[in-house]
Image (cartoon, rainbow, N blue to C red):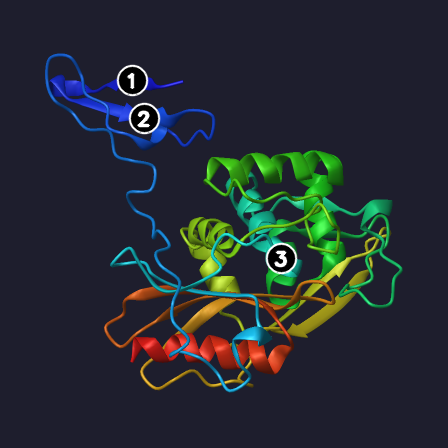
């Protein structure tokens, strides 16, 4: 549906949101009396172009990762492009979308209470060992979600917003579609492996690009460490502290000279490989989003990311 908004002084504004089921959201619209142009959905977005050549490669070779992208936000250009629309597993980069929904719908002082769906017993997943009845604020939860990448905290956010993991997944897919990320499908808020949980490098850009419009999000992803105290079901204190999983942020990896990494979100599973989406700035303070997906390991991931960032020098 196309909606018309008539403003004061005879001006006309057209609100044409993205809708994958109609072409009207992507094309010119003219009024009958005065030529007016509705802004296209992608007017402020970077659009992938031709595949980049192998000249900008790393010593581990082009087969050591599946996809890599570099987006110039100010110039609205794609500076490096490899497999932008390939469907891949996002792992914990999923949590960017989880955080985005929380930022849009919740107050930071909202108290969240864990139920049984927040209790994860597997030894091979990142978690803080939540128990039913544990409580923390949304602000605490978002810090732990994005800095430490706790999967049980992702569930905590989901059930307190939507009532269940499944209902939150519905919200995730609705939000992804609204952003134009129509080649994605999400089934959980954490990114734990599921064959029906996938995205593309371009869709990750679209989601992350929206998330960085929130100052709170940028603040959190740039933190190298975090400590807090939340509560158990009887009100007792539970202390927690962690270091960022992003090696640029925690100081393990140094970006190229004149490039500043603001922060980002990692993701790692056996099926997804090593993944990273992040925000960086060059010496003139222009902003860029880089995405690397399905790298063979962390070393390849950070080599390729630094390889992309070197294009900003």
Q: SS of the residue at dot 3?
A: loop
Q: Are marks 2 and 1 in contact (CB under 8 Å)?
A: yes
Side (left or right) of 258 relative to 69: left
The disc placed on residue 15 is 2
- What is the spatial separation of the Cα atoms under label 3 and label 2, in whole angstroms? 31 Å
Q: Which residue is mark 1?
A: 4
| Residue at the limit of the structure toward the right, as seen here | 121
Say whether residue 180 is left or right of residue 30: right
Task: Please say if 295 is above or below 1.
Answer: below
Label whose residue precedes the other's in the sequence (1 or 3):
1
**Marking on residue 129:** none
Q: CA distance from mark 1 to mark 3?
A: 37 Å
Q: Is residue 63 left or right of residue 124?
A: left
Residue drawn at x 50%, y 43% is 181
Element carrying mark 1: strand
Q: Which residue is more in the foreground, 102 or 18?
A: 18
In front of the other: 39 or 23: 23
Give the numbered dot on residue 90.
Answer: 3
User: Quadrant location of the N terminus?
Assistant: top left
Quarter-wise, where is residue 79 in the image?
bottom left
- CB of mark 1 within 8 Å of CB of mark 3? no
- Along the line of sight, the residue nearer the viewer: 217 or 83: 83
Question: Residue drawn 15% across and 21% down?
Answer: 11
Can residue 248 be spotted in the picture?
no
Residue 69 at x, y percent in the picture = 44, 64
Q: Position of residue 239 (x, y in %)?
A: 75, 68
Q: Position of residue 222 (x, y in %)?
A: 49, 69
* Front: mark 1 or 3: 3
Q: Quadrant of the C terminus?
A: bottom left
């Amino acid at each position: 549906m196309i909606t018309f908004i008539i403003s004061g002084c005879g001006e006309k504004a057209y609100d044409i949101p993205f809708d994958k089921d109609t072409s009207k959201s992507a094309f010119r619209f003219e009024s009958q009396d005065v030529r007016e142009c509705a802004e296209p959905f992608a007017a402020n977005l970077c659009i992938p172009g031709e595949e980049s050549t192998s000249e900008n490669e790393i010593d581990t070779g082009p087969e050591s990762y599946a996809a890599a992208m570099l987006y110039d936000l100010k110039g609205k250009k794609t500076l490096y492009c490899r497999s932008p629309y390939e469907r891949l597993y996002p792992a914990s980069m999923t949590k960017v979308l989880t955080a985005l929904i929380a930022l849009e719908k919740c107050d930071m002082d909202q108290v969240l209470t864990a139920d049984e769906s927040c209790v994860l017993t597997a030894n091979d997943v990142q978690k803080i060992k939540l128990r039913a009845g544990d409580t923390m604020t949304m602000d605490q939860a978002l810090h732990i979600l994005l800095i430490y990448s706790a999967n049980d905290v992702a569930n905590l956010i989901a059930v307190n917003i939507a009532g269940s993991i499944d209902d939150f997944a519905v919200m995730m897919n609705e939000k992804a579609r609204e952003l134009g990320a129509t080649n994605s499908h999400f089934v959980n808020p954490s990114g734990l492996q599921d064959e029906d949980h996938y995205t593309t490098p371009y869709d990750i850009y679209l989601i992350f690009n929206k998330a960085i419009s929130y100052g709170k999000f940028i603040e959190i992803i740039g933190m190298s460490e975090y400590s807090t105290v939340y509560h158990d079901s009887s009100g007792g204190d539970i202390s927690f502290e962690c270091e960022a999983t992003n090696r640029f942020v925690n100081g393990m990896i140094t970006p190229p000279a004149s490039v500043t990494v603001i922060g980002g979100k990692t993701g790692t599973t056996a099926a997804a490989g090593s993944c990273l989406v992040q925000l960086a700035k060059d010496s003139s303070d222009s902003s860029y989003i880089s995405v690397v997906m399905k790298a063979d390991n962390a070393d390849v991931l950070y080599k390729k990311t630094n390889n992309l960032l070197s294009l900003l020098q």
